[in-house]
Image (cartoon, rainbow, N blue to C red):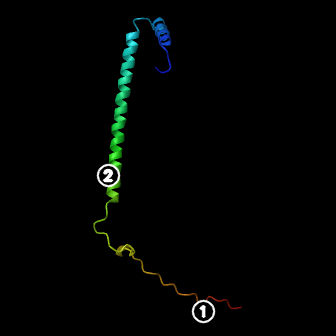
Amino acid sequence: MFGIGMGEILIVLALVILFFGGKKIPELMKGLARASHEFKKAKETIEQETNELKRTAQSAVDEFEKPAINAPNDTNSAPANLAVEPEVVEPFVNNPSSGSSKKD
């Protein structure tokens, strides 16, 4: 058991009895039992919250992976509300009548 022999366990128990006395040992055991119970309860709460988060995340993934009901068949065309008309850019022409040229 945990690499401890029966002789070592008896020595530890004898030291505990000598150190704490016979009347304190039941109180210590009750405290250990309460701590163990609280630890177990906290562990179960964490497991429940983790499982709930897993279910929530899985339902979000499932919702995301559902095909769209009104999806267009042609995946190469952009939706109408995202269509952008090309901007017409006129080439730069050096026009002397524009008044931008310097006269010496």
Q: Quadrant of residue 104?
A: bottom right
Residue type for callout 2: Ser
- The location of residue 29, given as percent across then percent down, is 38, 15
Residue type for callout 1: Asn
Q: Which mark is residue 58?
A: none
In the picture as drawn, the residue positioned furthest to the left comes out as 69
Q: Residue under circle 2?
A: 59
Q: Give the SS element for disc 2.
A: helix
> Quick one: label 2, few (<14), some, or many (20+) residues within 10 Å?
few
Residue 1 drawn above or below residue 95: above
- The location of residue 72, given as percent across then percent down, is 32, 72
Judging depth in this view, the residue of 1 and 37 nearest the camera is: 1
Separation of marks 2 and 1 at Cα, in angstroms: 65 Å
Residue 53 drawn above or below residue 93: above
- The location of residue 89, given as percent across then percent down, is 51, 84
Residue 76 drawn above or below residue 68: below
Q: How many marks?
A: 2
| Label 2–label 1 contact, CB within 8 A | no
For the point 61% across and 90% down, which residue is it?
Answer: 94
Q: Residue under circle 1?
A: 95
For the point 36% across and 41% down, which residue is it?
Answer: 50
Residue 41 drawn above or below residue 101: above
Q: Quadrant of residue 38?
A: top left
For the point 46% across and 20% down, which residue is it?
Answer: 1
Question: Upstream in the sequence, badge 2 or badge 1?
Answer: 2
